[in-house]
Amino acid sequence: MTPEQGVLGTFVRPGDAARAVRALKAKGHRDVRVAMPAPFPEVVAAVGKPRSFVDYITLPGALAGLVGGLLLTILTSLAWRLVTGGKPIVSLPPFVVITFELTVLIGSLANLVALGFGIGRGGRPKHFPVHERFNGDVIGVFAAGGDPGSVEEVLRESGAEEVTRVG
Amino acid sequence: MTTPSFRSLEETVRATHGPPGPAYFVALGIAGAAAAFGGWSYSLIVREGLHWTGLERPGMWGNLITDFVFWVGIAHSGTLISAVLFLFRARFRTAIYRVAEMMTVFAVLTAGLYPILHLGRPWFAYWLFPYPNQRELWVNFRSPLVWDVFAISTYLTVSTIFLFVGVAPDAAALRDRAQGWRKRLYTLLAFGWRGTDEQWRHYTRAYLFFAAFATPLVISVHSVVSWDFAVSVLPGWHSTLFPPYFVAGAILSGVAMVITILVPLRRAFHLEEIITQHHFDMLSRLVLLTSAIVTYSYVTEILLAFQGPPHDPERSTFVYRMTGAYAPVFWLMVTCNCVGPTLLYFKAVRGRAWALLTICVLVNVGMWLERFNIVVTSLAHDRLPFDWRVYVPSWVEWAMTFGAFGWFFFLLLIGLKLIPPVSIAEMKEDLAHHADAAGAGMDHDA
Amino acid sequence: MSDDRRGLGRRTFLKAAAVASAAAGCSPKAATQKLIPYLIPPDEGVPGTPLFYRTVCRECPAGCGVTARTREGRAVKLEGNPEDPIGRGALCARGQASLQALYHPDRFKGPMRRGPGGKLAPITWDEAEDSLGQALVAARAKGPGHVRLLSRSEPGSAGALQKAFLRSLGAREEDRVVLEPFDPAPLRAAGEVLFGRAELPVLDLAAARTVVAFGADFLETWISPVEYARQFASGRGRVGEERTRLTWVGPRLSLTGASADGWLRARAGGELAVALGLLRWLTDPKNAVPDLAPEARALFARVEPLQAADLAARAGVTWAEVERLARELARRRPSALLGPGPASQGTRATQLAGVVLLVNLVLGNLGRTVLYGLDPREDVPSSFQEVEGLLAAMSAGKVDVLLVAHADPAGALPAALGPEAALGKVPLVVSFASRPDATTDRAHLVLPDHHTLETFGDAVPRRGVVNTAQPVMTPLADTRSASQVLLEVAGKLPIEAAHFQWSDFYDYVQARAEPYAAAALGTVPDLALAQRDAQQRGGWWFDAARERVTPSLTLAAAGAFLSLPPAPVSGGAQLDLAVFPTALRGDGRGADLPWLREIPDALSSVSWSPWLEVSPATAARLGVRSGDLLAVSTTAGRVELPAYVYPGIRDDAVGLPLGGPEALSLLPNAKDGSGAFAFASATATVARAGKRVRLPLLEGSPYQHGRAITQTVSATAPAARRPDLSHVMYAEPKHPEHRWAMAIDLDRCTGCQACVVACFAENNVPVMGAEAAVQGRYMGWLRIERYLGDEPGGALDVQLLPMLCQQCTNAPCEPVCPVYATYHTAEGLNAQVYNRCVGTRYCSNNCPYKVRTFNWRDAKFPQPLQMQLNPDVTVRSRGVMEKCTFCVQRIRYGENQARDERRPVADGEITPACVQSCPAQAMVFGDANDPSSRVSRLAREPRGFRALEEVNAQPAITYLARVKEPEQP
């Protein structure tokens, strides 16, 4: 499937890419997307998108683990009251250990699921033209829509290696 | 030029996945054989019972539990290096954390076997997991062994996720230039990775969370393992000192094992440019630090025991450790864990690969002995003198102990050929900064 | 076991007796068919309900009464008969283990004849009896003495029938030889010389305030150990003057000595000098001992010439020690001086016995604690002289037919007597043994006898006590009662005299019961009925007090005993060979019973192996540790034995347990004046053999290492030390109905191990063998922990601590189990659920008492031993942990009985096997919820303490501290 139309420029230096992104934004291009082999901070900063939604899945996951751990330990102990070592049926200190482990476990699993969504969402070919070297050694800057001419110009000025029109 | 380019970096890493040489197969063969023999020895126990071990009353735990604690300990530095150092933004972790994480996962896979292997009726091991059953019987959450079940399985899950999440971008990089089954494998491992800014955004966030989860987990897991002993009433086990003491010991043995693996790995895979002297230097300091903590724990433990009255069982246990039938174990342990690492104060020693390797191998021996010393001597010398007996491991237990090393290195050798032993993406990040700092360009095909 | 069970037994006994008596006579085929599961069960055999039969123990001449518990037609456990005046419900280790003789895998399956190939081949009973009959006729034709019978002591119908049988063959009285290796013949001989009564005195130790044992192990094997242990214990367990004190005299501290308050380390053979010293001091007018017997003055005249110094030198002790003991005897009356026993039966045993009796006499013990006139003299064992005579006749070829009934000349006689060669000279050796022994290896005809539990019979241990035997189950194999065989053979003989009017041994027993019935019941309308009633209760018991006599001393005879013993010969390289009997090995007739081999000796903790006790000094001199092989040589032979370093033996002696071939091959053929075999006569040279064996030892360290695990109290300090446990973290768990608890009186416990055997039998505890013992994998749920002192090299202070699951309230083993395999029940038991256990073994690691045993491998119960297994108790599989349950099955049984009868459980009604079996009644079991129960009262005693109490596991077992009074000057 072909991505929506726009202009793709490839950069070698993260600095150039960042500059290009900022320039495009200055020119009023809302939708500038980047693909890169590593999360170069300056580029990320230039793109400056809202926070990841991962937070909103991971935290509830962890809380679920916490509550689940408490319920599991307490309810199963009450289900059949077997006295061991003269200790109370509901002995919280040991239950805390289990609860903690479950918090971490469920939290991590939720985190993984969230990440899965994130990667899926950000990895749609429609979202960004496929180019193997973006995992290798170049940074791609893609400006969707807008006036192709001006975009090309901006990209070239910023020191793009090559510039191609997509779609 | 001083620093390799992205491309050459990838080449270096990809080269580690090149067709293995005879040495590799020899190593793989030895490891596999050891594991297989250990497995067969264990089958004796399954078929005829634990009388094949040297265990007896009062010493109902021996080599197998020692192995368990030892491997859990090894498993620790992996997460420590990748998660904790990540949170502390210690840059030197980048080049080495992948190997450490692989080591962690395989070590947990090894450690996790022993609680099952040492059971009298291992075919009922699943009874230790809480699941609804017609007996309407759940597990006893007061038992440290159940804490173990939860801690170990959580730790295995989280560290495995952590490893593979870290692998995804690298797998993508490799995927794009691989053919055949490797292409399919890396496509799978890449997890649909394309390196877009949105993916990176979620990724970095999630990675931070993983690190945040893993860090307390590391501390908790070995604390739980230490509670296996600390919550008992046995003199020599019953000590509040155990959790920090065990965690420090775990990190010591873990880091030592990382070095033990990295030194030959660096040579074999020609990673001299990536894994540099600087890394070994930092790791050596970590060994030095944890060794100091461990030494401190030994001393504290003994001093505390000697607070007791002259005939106090605990005091007697510690005297026994130092002078009794197991005294050689104790003093060898002290030599390996306390004396040996002090040599690392000297830069010259830290700089010599062979010296480093020797010291770290000895630390691993010492740490195994430490666990043996804790598990066995306390049991052999408990409260009722009439029951004292000296436990000597049987050949079956030794076979299983060495089998564990075989199994671990077998997994590691395979893993090294499938998973990039260095995090390409993070290396690139570093490189970029390096380059910018140097103001130099990155030519495509240097 | 509760009374109502016996009620059921009574109602149904007539049927049972009929069935069994029929079985005794009828064809073996029919007998074995009865073992096939019932299609229509008989009324008395309710599945799952035990039946109790009363019978008698024949493992030693004591003749204790037995209650056999049967399930589904199989005897599963032997306990004492509470109505029997001898055992009073207790039974010793060997008596209980005789159950394994019934189910012994090696038991002969039927009669056998040695074929031309020299192998025993099965034959039919008719063949066997015919060939025996022919041989007897032929031998008889040659005149008297050609048919001889060697038997164990059979004080009852069996013996009487043997005599009658021989008489009918025209044999002489002496043609029947009775072999009892441990028979205290010297005591009889001395009695004859002094009082003209060749009798064994019967003791009443309950009346004695001081007991002095001259090598007489009356708590292990001597004469009637169960009875004497009970009597002795009745004076223990209290603080102060009223407590019975025991002094042990001998070169080696025996298990009996371990219960003693003082040990006079007399050298081997020195006991005599000690006794003479006591006699001299006590009779000496200047010591002014009050109310002595009138003979004292005259006796003093005889002993005056004996110099204290000489006596002390002969005794190997200081005169002061002798004096101290003498003072105690003078002060604390009445007393009882016992001896000699096998350990002190030397070449002057009769003299020792005589002097001991004289001391008893002057102290006025005769008639009070030492009673004459009660020895039934039913079947007095022959002296070794007679045995030798028989062997000589055999060797000389003067014996054509030798009948051997439960005696094992080849295996039980010292090799020095050459019994095997003698047997070889006899054309026809007929053995009635039911298991292979050294004699059956040389027998030509083997006619396996029933086990006591399969046959009728009786035993008369003393006047007024006739314990009856009856079959408790159908015979396992094609065996036949030896007495029945004699009757049948006799019936087939072409001799008028041999045709008895009884064709069935049961009738014979009944016929002989007539006088007993008369004595017990007065008039006897129907003997048969009375006999059955007696058998149901387990015997005829009647007051024989009028038989008692106070013997009168013939002074002239006494003189013979009052000479100074010769100076000791041993010294230098020569060490005294102090052989001693043990509670488990006895005289060796149970040597092949798994329980008796598996259970460690209480003092040395050695199992499955003989051992040689050497003092630490000797060990140091020889440069050996426990487990090093020592070569022991006497004039009779040379044996290699593993050393066991034991501070409880003199440096000039080495100790060797009797009951095995080792001792027999080392003992030279020596006898004392009365013709009794002199066990304590040998000296030996001991040297390192250079080899080392892994000795199956239970003990780790025999010292308490200052941990005060056991405690002692005294009149000055009557309370045990208890830690302050006032700070509690958790409320004690609820015990709404019962809270089962136990109290163990360490002042009464003698370490006899009856409780251990009882536990093995009741709970299907497996026997794992020597290798397991070496590896420390002994499975016993109950062990006697024996401490020899506080620190190595310190003072010898033997303490016994029966260690079993303490059923803690805060059991450390429970919370560490991940699968709830062990937990605290509402009745306070620490339950162990075998089928939940996965075998993490953490519970054992966390048990401060280390009373949990793990099944390292699957246990084996070789056929037909598995028939002994208690159906009420699971047989544990490999990989699970097990431990003492306070015999929960017996608790449930008792509770159910009470519930069925709508009454509360009575205190003392429920007893775990160990408590039930204890001859000394040192163990008490009951409900701690009931403040008036015996166990609660004992738990409140000042002597009470708990093992490792500072751990705060709050055990349900309270130990009552041993009393240790400081020695009077």
Image (tube, coloured by chain):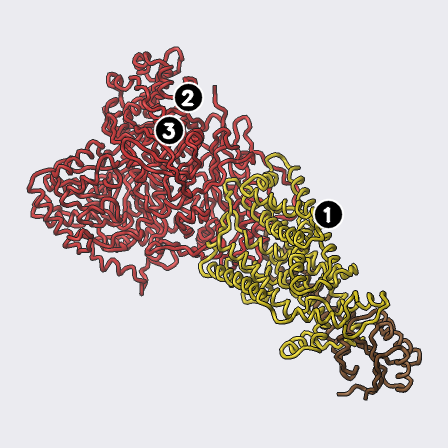
Does C554 sit left or right of C717 as displayed?
left
Closest to the observer, A125 or B434: B434
Q: Which chain carries label 2?
A: C
Of residues C108 and C417, the one drawn nearer to the viewer in this rendering: C417
Residue B328 horizontal side relative to residue B10, left or right: left
Q: Tell me the tag on residue C325.
A: 2
Distance from disc 3 to disc 1, alpha carbons, whole Å, reads 63 Å
Q: What residue type is labelled 1?
A: Tyr
Task: Give the percent coordinates (x, y) of residue B46.
Answer: 48, 61
Q: Dot 2, crowdedness within 10 Å: few (<14), some or many (≥20)?
A: many
The C terminus of chain B: image quadrant: bottom right
Q: Which chain carries label 1?
A: B
Instruction: State the SS at label 1.
Output: helix
The image quadrant of residue B267 is bottom right
For the residue marked with disc 2, what is the amino acid?
Leu
Label 1: which residue?
B345
Q: Nearer the viewer, mark 3 or mark 2?
A: 3
**Residue C235 seen anywhere in this rendered image of the structure:** no
The chain assigned the colour red in the figure is: C
Nearer to us in this view, B396 or B263:
B263
Which chain is drawn using yellow?
Answer: B
> Same chain, marks 2 and 1?
no
The numbered dot on residue C653 is: 3
Q: In this view, does A67 lie to the left or right of C275?
A: right
Q: Which chain carries label 3?
A: C
Q: Do the residues labelled 2 and 1 touch (CB within 8 Å)?
A: no
Q: What label does residue C501 carry, if any?
A: none
Residue type for callout 3: Ala
Q: Quadrant of the rendered structure where residue A152 is?
A: bottom right
Q: Where is residue C779 in the image (x, y as percent from the top left)?
A: 44, 49
Q: Residues within 10 Å of mark 3 (few under 14, many from 20)?
A: many
Residue B358 horizontal/vertical position (percent): 64, 52
